[in-house]
Each structure stands twice: as structure tokens, then as C-alpha cells.
Amino acid sequence: MDAVRQHYEIYPYPRYPLLASIRRSDTSHLKLSRLWARWNGCKLPKANRQILIAGCGSFAPYPFSLANPDCRITALDLSAATIKRARLHCLLHLRLNVRFVVGNLLDSQTAPGPFGLIDAYGVLHHLPDPLAGLLALKQRMTGNGLLRIMLYSHGARSGTEAARRALRRLQVQDLPTLEALYKRLPQGSRLAERLGETPEGNTDHGLADAFLHPQVTVYRVAELKPLITASGLELLVFSHPGALTDTATEWQRLSLQEANGDLDTNFVLLLRKTTTA
Ligand SMILES: C[S@@+](CC[C@H](N)C(=O)[O-])C[C@H]1O[C@@H](n2cnc3c(N)ncnc32)[C@H](O)[C@@H]1O
């Protein structure tokens, strides 16, 4: 865990300009009252207007605050440098309903909740035991509470993962060394191609997150299902780009895409803690 923390102390993710702004209308998919009404079929109880952004990174608290001015938001991250930047981004945009906490989501004393909505986007796959993380978040959810997670898929990440592992074997641990290596690589080599084709590869935070990360798990479709089952949470819907609304059909579509070698999205899921779970 310390290696992950140290990574994000050096390379907070993402590193958008502090004055970068978005329109409230573009954040409606993050609005708790809307999600609650859609999936629980009733008005959000006042007591449940609490949101936890677990592994918040340096930007997400801003759009969540914009979407949810009527909620109390807790932004939790392992890295103090990340929290510092996230806090500054919110302050500069006068988003004041966010409490910032440096800490580990595995520690049950930290931000115990309960929360009506938890967001852990791109976080659990950086834990040594992602299921333990999922269960730790479930503990913090209200009855009928919602949890959005994003997990890396084997399909979307296999090329990046091969390059990341190769770079670790070469003991490339910082961006200047990575950039110097990239310049020396023969054009057309597989590693050069991987480095060149990475989404966000034109940013320091994107390169560092893709290639210098010390801890990554990727999931095949067949591994995702047991993880969700073991958590005891209910899968409501997939929300990655192109996902079908019916979950049974989406499992089939994902399996087929994976078998054909053309699965190119990570998995985004909305889960619910049923009152009996
Ligand atoms: C890839 S970033 C994603 C940030 C944000 N969720 C987003 O979507 O932009 C992962 C973040 O999770 C944080 N993180 C990783 N493990 C954590 C843990 N055990 N507890 C709290 N935060 C953690 C990291 O410090 C990092 O800021």
C-alpha cells in the first residue's frame, strides 16, 4: 500500500489545469437524488444525502460537488499531494460542501459513513485485495445505498499491462527515465507502439498512471462476476460506453467481445446494497 501512496504523492492523478471548469448540466449522471429516484423509485431521504468519493484523485470532488450542492461530500484519498490539489480545485471554483480526508479506504475508522452514494472509480484494482476494498466500502453504505466502481478489463488493458510489466523488469521507475527510454526505442518496436498509443499518453499523469504504477489487477469477464457475487452487492447496471441496459445481455456481449479479442472498454458498474445484504 505504501508503494501506491508514494506513487500518487509524486504523480497525483489526474493533473488537469486548476482553472479547468465544467458545466453543471454535464454532471447530471453524478447527481445522487437523480440516481436514487431512478434505482430506488423514491425520493432521496435527507439522512442519505452523504457521498463518499473513495480514492478521489485530484479532480472528481469538483464535478461531484457541482452535481450535488445539497449533499455533504467526503473526498478520501491515500495521497496528501492529491488531496491538496483536489481541495485547491474545489476552492478555486467555490465548491465548499466537500470535506477532504487523507487516509486508507481499508481503514474502517476513516470516513465511516454511512453514505447514500460511494464512488470508487479506478481505485479498487490498485488494492492488493480488491474484494477487501469492495467489502470495506459496502460497510459504509446506507440501506439501498449506491456504489459506482470502475475496474480495468483485461481486454482494454492487456497491451498497457504488458508494457508496464516490461518497464518494471527494466526498473524504469520515473518519468524522465521512461521518456529517455522512449526516445531510444527503435520506431515500430512493440514497446514504443504501446507507449505511443496510450490514452492520456500526452500527459505526465496519464503516462505515470499507465506505465509506472506499482499495483494493478485487470479483470476478465469471467472473473468480474465472482467478485460481485462475493461482495453481496446487487448489480444494477453497467455504465461504460456502449453498455446495454439489460445486465444479462451486457454480460453476454462483454463475454463475446472478449472472446473475439475486441473488448476495448474498462468495466463501469453501478451496485446497490440491498437492505437485507
Ligand atoms: C487512478 S486514481 C483515480 C482517481 C479518481 N477516482 C478519478 O476517477 O479521477 C486512483 C486514486 O485512488 C487512490 N487510492 C488508491 N488506493 C487507495 C486506498 N487504499 N485508499 C484511499 N485511496 C486510495 C490513489 O491515491 C489515487 O488518487
Image (tube, rainbow, N blue to C red):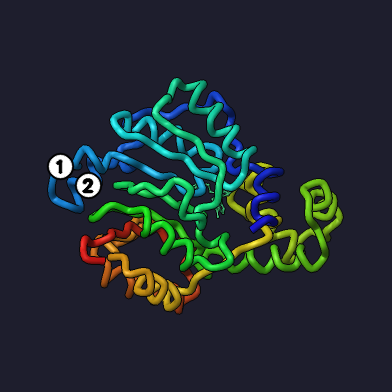
Residue occupying the point 70% across, 49% down = 6
Quadrant hosting residue 79: top right
Q: Position of residue 224 (x, y in %)?
A: 42, 72
Q: Residues within 10 Å of mark 1 (few under 14, many from 20)?
A: few
Element under label 1?
Answer: loop
Inspect this view and state whether residue 202 appears. Answer: no
Residue occupying the point 34% across, 55% down = 239
- The residue at which mark 1 appears reads as 43
Quadrant hosting residue 223: bottom left
Q: Amino acid at mark 1?
A: Lys
Left or right for 240, reference 47 = right
Q: Position of residue 209 (x, y in %)?
A: 64, 52
Residue occupying the point 20% across, 53% down = 39
Q: Position of residue 64 (x, y in %)?
A: 39, 37
The single residue placed furthest to the left in the displayed view is 42
Quarter of the image that includes the C terminus: bottom left
Q: Residues within 10 Å of mark 2 (few under 14, many from 20)?
A: many
Inspect this view and state whether residue 28 appears. Answer: yes
Residue occupying the point 25% across, 46% down = 35
Element under label 2?
Answer: helix
Q: Position of residue 161 (x, y in %)?
A: 64, 66
Q: Amino acid at mark 2?
A: Trp
- The residue at which mark 2 appears reads as 36
Circle 2/circle 1 CB separation < 8 Å = yes
